[in-house]
């Protein structure tokens, strides 16, 4: 083999079993083992460094750590995921990814080391990493396809397009090449809310054509509204179900400009008022007659069905992103529903819940830890401490002395807390999550049992 090695500038190159190219570790059989190991090492190092910034009850806030984990650590994992994602089907790789998330979650919650990863993931609304990797791979595949750089094959990493598929991905996109136009005949003025109304009349030159445009999206569909005061014009095209509000707003302005050309008004002074932040801003709809009319027209457009092939305008990126997000949430929920064990956590949570996650992340480090421990059952109560080998005494409830002191007992059953439970309404924590006050009640329990 040595004799076959190529030379470069007179120097004989040697063969290597691995090579790092553009940050990806390649091995001869493309097993990606080396790459995953290097990801794990990188993430572990970063998380260990992060661990020095907080203790049990001090340091970086859970909210900040949550951001760092999601936006700094996780992208390290998903880098180039589009080529190695099939690896997530292998048990070993899945475990390796789990280990990374297992290190990350306690950095956010300060939870006890025994806390199950899936319980923490569900609590924090963090999609399990193997699912997240797949979702990211799908997003990238879609982007490459839009750029005409995706080669469709029916094996290897290319099958991500069939693994996660939806008619959405086949629709044309609203992506377009960036074009710079320095010769801009349009002037954009953004007026503050206070100045509006006072300046409106001063702003307009006499004899100018004044237009109001608006976009709207309802359950039934989207629509645009274009209204001109003089000459009187009212247009309200329906835009189907895939058009976003922003797209409808921009389309309304574009159609309005076209209408001006068609009506031969191009030599006149033209004003187009839009309430979209994209261009100009008319504060709210209320009170400004022309704008209310445009709003009304847009609603009319959105209530009428669009006749013809959808999407009316190319699909925006956010549409596919939303689809992948809900795909990942569903996969996460499936895993939560099917997992065995986690009896107490399942009593407390039906699945990932955005309100609960936001509530927990808004607490300080100590309280986040206490609430997490009571929701997962891995807490400082006697029974769990005994299981962990940290407590040798009696495990009966220190309040009622009847049953074992577990999280399920103190939250749902303890007779000594019956009256308090009835007054605060802690009958069903799964419902309480939606009432925004579960964390407060759990912290009260933590105080009663002197958890720290
Ligand atoms: Zn009790």
Image: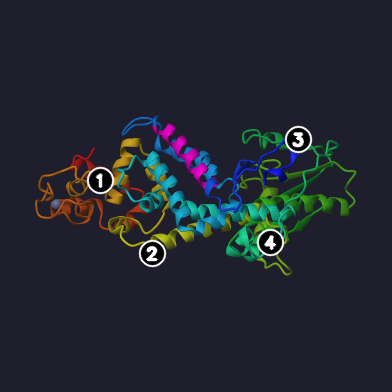
Q: In front: 437, or 132?
A: 132
Callout 3 environment at 10 Å: few (<14), some (14 to 19), or many (20+)? few
Q: Earlier in the sequence, mark 1 or mark 4?
A: 4
Q: Earlier in the sequence, mark 3 or mark 4?
A: 3
Callout 2 environment at 10 Å: few (<14), some (14 to 19), or many (20+)? few
Tally the numbered discs.
4
Q: CA distance from mark 1 to mark 2?
A: 24 Å
- Which quarter of the figure has residue 333? bottom left
Q: In front: 323, or 135?
A: 135
The tag on residue 338 is: 2
Labels 1 and 4 touching (C-beta < 8 A): no
Q: Which residue is mark 4?
A: 301
- Image coordinates for residue 58, horizontal then vertical, percent: 34, 30
Labels 3 and 4 touching (C-beta < 8 A): no
Q: CA distance from mark 3 to mark 4?
A: 30 Å
Give the image's coloring scheme: rainbow
- Which quarter of the figure has residue 226? bottom right
Kindly state the secondary structure of the residue where label 2 is placed.
helix
Span shown in magenta = 35-51
Q: CA distance from mark 2 to mark 3?
A: 63 Å
Q: Which residue is mark 3?
A: 203
């Amino acid at each position: 083999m040595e004799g076959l090695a190529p030379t470069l500038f007179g120097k004989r190159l040697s063969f290597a079993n691995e090579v790092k190219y553009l940050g990806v570790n390649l091995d001869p059989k493309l097993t990606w083992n080396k790459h995953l190991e290097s990801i794990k090492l990188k993430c572990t190092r970063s998380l260990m460094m992060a661990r020095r910034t907080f203790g049990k009850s001090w340091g970086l806030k859970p909210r900040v750590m949550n951001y760092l984990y999601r936006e700094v650590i996780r992208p390290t994992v998903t880098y180039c995921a589009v080529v190695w994602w099939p690896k997530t089907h292998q048990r070993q790789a899945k475990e390796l990814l789990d280990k990374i998330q297992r290190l990350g979650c306690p950095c956010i919650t300060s939870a006890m080391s025994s806390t199950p990863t899936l319980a923490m993931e569900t609590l924090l609304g963090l999609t399990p990493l193997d699912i997240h990797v797949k979702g990211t791979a799908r997003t990238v595949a879609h982007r490459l396809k839009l750029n005409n750089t995706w080669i469709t094959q029916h094996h290897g990493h290319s099958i991500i397009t069939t693994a996660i598929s939806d008619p959405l991905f086949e629709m044309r996109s609203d992506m377009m090449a960036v074009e710079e136009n320095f010769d801009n005949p349009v002037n954009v003025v953004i007026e503050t809310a206070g100045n509006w109304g006072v300046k409106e009349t001063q702003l307009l030159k006499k004899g100018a054509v004044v237009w109001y445009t608006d976009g709207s999206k309802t359950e039934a569909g989207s629509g645009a509204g274009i209204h001109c005061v003089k000459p009187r014009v009212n247009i309200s095209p329906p835009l189907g179900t895939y058009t976003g509000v922003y797209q409808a707003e921009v389309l309304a302005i574009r159609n309005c400009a076209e209408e001006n050309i068609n009506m031969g008004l191009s030599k006149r002074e033209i004003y187009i008022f839009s309430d979209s932040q994209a261009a100009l801003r008319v504060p709210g709809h209320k009170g400004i007659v022309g704008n209310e009319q445009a709003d009304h027209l847009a609603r009319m457009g959105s209530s009428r069905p669009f006749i013809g092939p959808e999407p009316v305008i190319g699909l925006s990126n956010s549409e596919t992103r939303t689809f992948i997000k809900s795909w990942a949430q569903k996969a996460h929920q499936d895993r939560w529903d099917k997992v065995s064990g986690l009896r107490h956590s399942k009593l407390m949570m039906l699945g990932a819940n955005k309100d609960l996650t936001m509530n927990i992340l808004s607490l300080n480090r100590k309280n986040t830890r206490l609430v997490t421990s009571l929701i997962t059952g891995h807490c400082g109560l006697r029974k769990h401490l005994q299981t962990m080998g940290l407590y040798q005494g009696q495990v009966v409830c220190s309040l009622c002395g009847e049953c074992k002191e577990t999280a399920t007992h103190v939250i749902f059953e303890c007779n000594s807390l019956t009256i308090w439970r009835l007054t605060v309404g802690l009958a069903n924590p799964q419902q309480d999550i939606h009432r925004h006050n579960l964390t407060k009640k759990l912290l009260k329990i933590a105080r009663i049992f002197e958890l720290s």
